[in-house]
Image (spheres, rainbow, N blue to C red):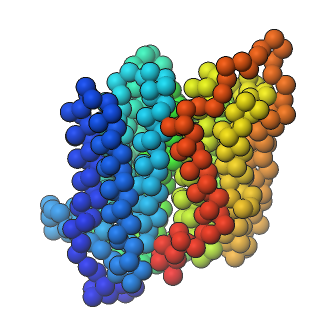
Amino acid sequence: MDAVSTTNIVENSNLLLAVIIPLFGSLVVMTLKKNPNLREAVSSCASVLLFLIVLSFIPALKAGKTLIYPLFQLLPGLSITLRADGFSMIFALVASSLWMIAVFYSMGYMRAHDEPCQTRFNACFALAIFGAIGVAFSDNLFTLYLFYEIVSVCTYPLVAHHQDQESYDGARKYIIYLTTTAKFFLLPALILIYVLVGNLDFPHNIFTGIIPTDTKSWVVVMLYVFCIFGFAKNGIMPFHHWLPGAMVAPTPVSALLHAVAVVKVGVFCTTRTMLYVFGVDTMHALNLGIPTAYFVGFTIIMASVIALSKDNLKARLAYSTVSQLSYIILGVAMLTPHAIDGGLIHIVNHAFAKITLFFCAGAIYIASHKKYISEMSGLGRTMPFTFGAFAVASLSMIGAPPVAGFVSKWYLLVGSMEAHQIGILLILITSTVLNVGYFAPITYKAFFGKPPAGEAAVGIKEAPLSMLIPILIAVTVSVIIGIFPGFMMQFVQMVTG
């Protein structure tokens, strides 16, 4: 029986408003090509309004309510319906808050670099958030799938933004990986689940799932595998190659891909499906969890090893993302309370740290035109705020206190011991050592390395304030949620009880 009774389900039209705001903002931005200041003001206002609406859902959720808003009934048991619950809020708060920061940063970056097609960029950026918020507030697997595909299509022009051969190649790989996996794996699984169940609605607890108990085990396992691989935005190897390839995009796009819209959509959809379609009980009964944890553990280690070999800063951060995303899936797959808590809170903790790191990479490029780590020796002395923020965000990725990543790592380590999985404990420890290996040298070179012979740092200074302020805000939030994790953990605990 669901943990939420029908008396606790409340219809709320503000859910539709939350989804419409970024869509409407995008449409207005398209009409303001000749007025860049007004164009960016619209983006900023839309992001603030979205964040306030998402915040408005918190009192009802804390009172034990679940908010829904039905839109269309397509077939019996198949509808487009919106829902806000604890799981929704984890991602919705991240996407809406980081959109505010990213809009301000993008304005500074795109103007400082004199990027072309800034109207299209801002419009597609807002459309990507439209898709992400739709994913966050999906009440069923069909609605989730529709918004998942919207994110793929709307972010394609962002990856191809520079309109050169390298950008087109990266964007082609991006769209082929994401759409073909969704069509060949996810869509057939969706159809078969609908045939088996008669609907695709998520339950209100993480235990029961929706798969009938009399379904043959091999069918459930096949559906599970198809769903894991179908959400290729989650970056699991071997369907991860699109992610480093997408780094040809401008840095604000990379930040959007890695922290806000794309990869977070992937892991959110994956974990939502694991917990609300299959459920903890079914995964336990068929022993789906621990094999999944070890499978993504391979991605955690291998992506970290590859990151060690990358001299390009954005490429190293990209492989770091591939590794860190699997922490989220690993935590949920262990199926213990602390492990699930650690996986879900890492959606938040990784987002703020990783957007800081990409913002720093963009600031470094704007200020010095350097994108290779080997060229950054001594640069921290001329850009102390940028590299200081980079160092703090790196600590979060490593899992060191008092930054947010420590909370994730602590819960995951405790969860691995709850699950009696020494192998997973060793994976987490090995990954931590590798994180130190590919992050610490960057900070060390920047502050203690000597600039290359004959190269002067004359003229190099911090990036414009419109870029520096978002960096400092993002890294400050990362520290705050590391010291005071209770605010975000309350939504995680609405999921796990």
Residue 157 x/y as whole percent: 35, 30
Q: Position of residue 432 (x, y in %)?
A: 75, 53
Specify whether residue 117 is in view.
Answer: yes
Name the side, left or right, on which 124 lies relative to 405.
left
Q: Is residue 275 above or below residue 393?
A: below
Asked if 200 appears above or below 266 in the picture, the reply is: below
- Residue drawn at x 23%, y 47% is 24
Task: Give how far across and how far down residue 185 sits, in percent.
Answer: 39, 49
Q: Is residue 286 above or below residue 356?
A: below
Name the foreground residue: 457 vs 168: 457
Tell me what residue is drawn at x 30 percent, y 74 percent.
67
Residue 184 picture location, percent across and down: 36, 45
Query: Height in image: 279 above or below 469?
Result: below
Q: Residue at x 50, y 37 (%)?
A: 466
Q: Is residue 302 visible?
A: no
Return the residue nearer the eye: 49 or 402.
49
Q: Quadrant of residue 409?
A: bottom right
- Number of numbered tags placed on the structure image: 0
Whether residue 81 sits left or right of residue 209 in the image: it is left
* Image quadrant assignment for residue 471: top right
Query: The N terminus is located in which quarter?
Result: bottom left
- Work out whether residue 77 or residue 156 is closer to the camera in this orientation and state it: 156
For this orientation, the residue located farthest to the top is 454
Instruction: Give me the residue at 44% from left, 16% from top.
Output: 165
